Every structure is written in C-alpha cells, then in structure tokens.
Image (cartoon, rainbow, N blue to C red):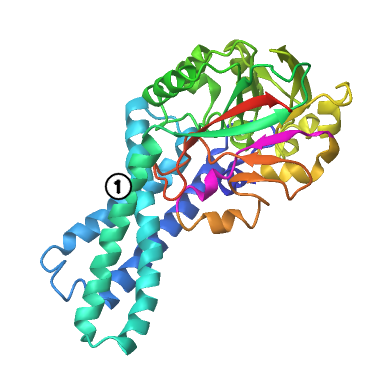
Amino acid sequence: MNWRHKILHNPHQHRPSRRNLVKLWALLSLLTVLSLKTVELLAVRELGLRDAGVFAGQWWLWRGFELVAVGTIPLAFMSPYLSLKPTLLVAVTWVGYVLCGFLSSLFILAILTSLLALLLGLLLPLSADQLTLLLAVGALLTAGLFSGLGWIHARGRPVLETRELQVSAQRDDAEPLRLVQLSDLHIGNTVGKRFVRRLVAQVNALSPDIIVITGDVADGSAARLKPVAQLLGYLEARLGRFVVLGNHDYYSGADAWKALLADCGFTVLMNAHRRVSANGIELAIAGITDQDSARYHPTDRPDPAQAVAGIPPGMPIIMLAHQPRSALDMPHERISLQLSGHTHAGQFWPFKYFVKLQQPVTAGYSERLGHPLYVSRGTGYWGPPKRIFARPEITLFMIRPCN
C-alpha cells in the first residue's frame, strides 16, 4: 500500500480527516528535515564546502533552501487532498516536487561521496581539503545535472517502444493490428492539459487499432481533474479503448474515476473482458482490478479467472493488470500477453532497486513467471518531475498472425 495513503486512508470516504493530514504533514516534515541535516553534515560541513569558501558569506542561501524545502515538500505530497486556490496549489506542488527531486539525489550522493572520500583519501596523493572539496562540489553538480536531465526526460516526449506479438489468426496473411499501451499517466497538479494534449497527438499519429491504459490514470479526485482527464476522450482507436484502474486511482476515488473514464469512451475492465476482431485476427482484451483494490472496495478483489471466463479455448488473451506481481495469480496457460505498469522502472536512480523488493519484473519483457509479461516504464511520472535511467514510454504492439 502507498505509504502516503496508508496514513490518510479513511475506510468510509476518500477525503482524509484533518487529524490524518496533520500526521502526514508531521512525518513528511520530519523526513525532509532529516534529509537536509544529513546533506548539511556530509556534503556541506564534513566535506568542507562552507570552510572552503563555496558558501562563505552566503550561508543564508543554504538556510533559505532549507526553509523553502521544509515549507513546500510536505505540501506537494499532500496536494491531492488540500483545499487551496488552484494557482497556489499548483505552484506549491511544482516547487515542492522539484526540490524533492533535487534533495533526494543530493542526499544519496552526499552519502556516496562521503564514503568515496574515505576510500580515495587512501589512494590518491591529494590533500584532505582538496579531495573533500572536489567530491562535495561534484555531489552538488551531479545532483543538479540529474534534476535537469530528469526534468527533460519526464516532461519531454515519451519514447516509442515497438514490440511484436504473434497470435493465431484465421488468415496467415492478415494485416497486423496496432495496439498502443499507455500506463501511469498520473494526471494531477503537474501533469496537466499541455502534457495530455501532446500525448494524445503523439498516440493518434500512430493510428492505433486498440488503445489500453494499464492503471494510475490520475493522482487526485475526478471532480477536480475532470477538465484534464476529459482530453483522453480525444484518443482514437477504431476497435476500442480499454483501461484498468491502478492503486492511485483507488486512492483518488475509484467509482468516480470509473464513471469519468466511461464518459470519455473507455471500457473499464473490472475482472472482465471484451472481444475484438479485425483483419482476420480475433482476440480478447481482459482486465483485472488492482492488486490492492480490495483494501478500498471489498467487492473489487482481483479475479483473473472471472476475467477470462467465457473466452473460447485457443482465443488469444491480452490481460491488463496494473501491477506486475498480479502475474503470480494468472491462469498462465491462457494468457498470450500480460500488460502491466506501476513500477515506473524506479523513475530515477537508485529507486529501481527498491522496486525489485516488491515486484518480480520492473520493466520490459519477461517470460519467467509462467506467461509472457510486458511492464511499461510508464508514460507520465509521479511526484518529482524527474526520470533518470527510466525514460517514459508509449508502447506499440504489432499483433501479427503466426506463420
């Protein structure tokens, strides 16, 4: 379960209590302060930035950074649940998430450079002051580089990944079907109309026959984000548009999001399937509810067997499941391909290594779980607008008949 929503969750409604909001604010503020003090100790004091003159006479800059970070980072993570003026809410979210992305890299690099200083001090003929200053400046510059490059990747055009899927068909010479997978858009305070309009244009240019979204459409209430989400209705696919809900959609009110996506022309698959047929190829698009959905809707427990019930034997099945670990519960012999997301491939280094503790596959194609599985790196981003070694993607599957 998402740690943020675990604190805020009210079993009777998706609007958290004021008491829980205060608890979340206190926890986030404490984590931010601890991160800042760790960086100050390791990169600023221990590695000599202040004494070496980099901050000499300008120490107020660091204190100002601390003040802004503590004031905005907790509010950014709480933003889907705050009642503020839209312009103020968006501004606070942007500032907080950008600073969070920078601080997270600086925190990790400060620790690594401190350890590296100990090692290199034994190997290189440099004075302690020269070495520590070099490493500290390197940590600051690298954190800035990661933040800048991560911004460009997260906010830029998603990379197009093209894959092939062979299925049984009525004719060997049938024209392939074009299926586009999107995942983890996380429409919210920073993923807005401009981002979605550009995405819609990029997808429609691919002339897809089928479009699927494998969860986490949004991070916030459907009522507030409706003007942005409605732009997804301009996605064009002649055989249908299908979606399954992800954990963030459940955090944000699953019933409202199901209704809004249906109004946008999407078929919301809740342990169900639909058949599509064209070009001599007939297949089923199935989808299950999120792995954690029963925590919020007891009746929405994922049921792969129900999702494929009634599909004729031998018909190819493309299964949509937000989390890759849902593969462990699938009827393996029936699934031609499972499409998942959720992981963001870690989004930025080194978090992909933590994702591996929860998910069996973090990105790309795998057959080691009993049936073919493809995990998207995600099309949008969550939290900091930052992606390092995990470029966002749009995935185009060319579904061809078996030879």
Q: Position of residue 256 (x, y in %)?
A: 62, 20
- Horizontal arrangement in the rendering, residue 345 relative to residue 66 (left or right): right
Residue 70 visible in the shown view: no
397 vs 116, nearest the viewer = 397
Is residue 354 something that shows in the picture?
Answer: yes
When the figure is inspected, residue 289 is found, relative to residue 106, above or below; the finding is: above
**Residue stretch rendered in magenta on the structure:** 334-348
As for residue 346 lying within the magenta part, the answer is: yes
Decide which of 260, 208 is in the foreground and name it: 208
Residue sitting at 63 percent across and 19 percent down? 177
Residue 147: x %, y % from top left = 33, 50
284 vs 184: above or below: above
- Pick whichever, 260 or 134, lies toward us: 134
Q: Nearer the viewer, residue 395 or 350?
A: 395
Q: Residue at x 27, y 62 (%)?
A: 140
User: Which residue is farthest left?
Assistant: 57
Task: Residue under label 1, please give it.
Answer: 148
- Does the magenta portion include 79? no
Location of residue 81 with respect to 388 vertically, above or below: above
Quarter placement of the C terminus: top right
Could you say where residue 285 lies in the image, as x and y percent from the top left? 73, 23
108 relative position to 17: left or right: left
Image: 70 above or below 114 = above
- Report which quarter residue 222 is drawn in: top right
Q: Secondary structure at mark 1?
A: helix
Q: Quadrant of residue 61?
A: bottom left
Could you tell whether 76 is left or right of 282 in the image? left
**Label 1 neighbourhood size at 10 Å, few (<14), some (14-19), many (20+)?**
some
| Residue 16 picture location, percent across and down | 57, 36
Residue type (three-letter) at the residue carrying disc 1: Gly
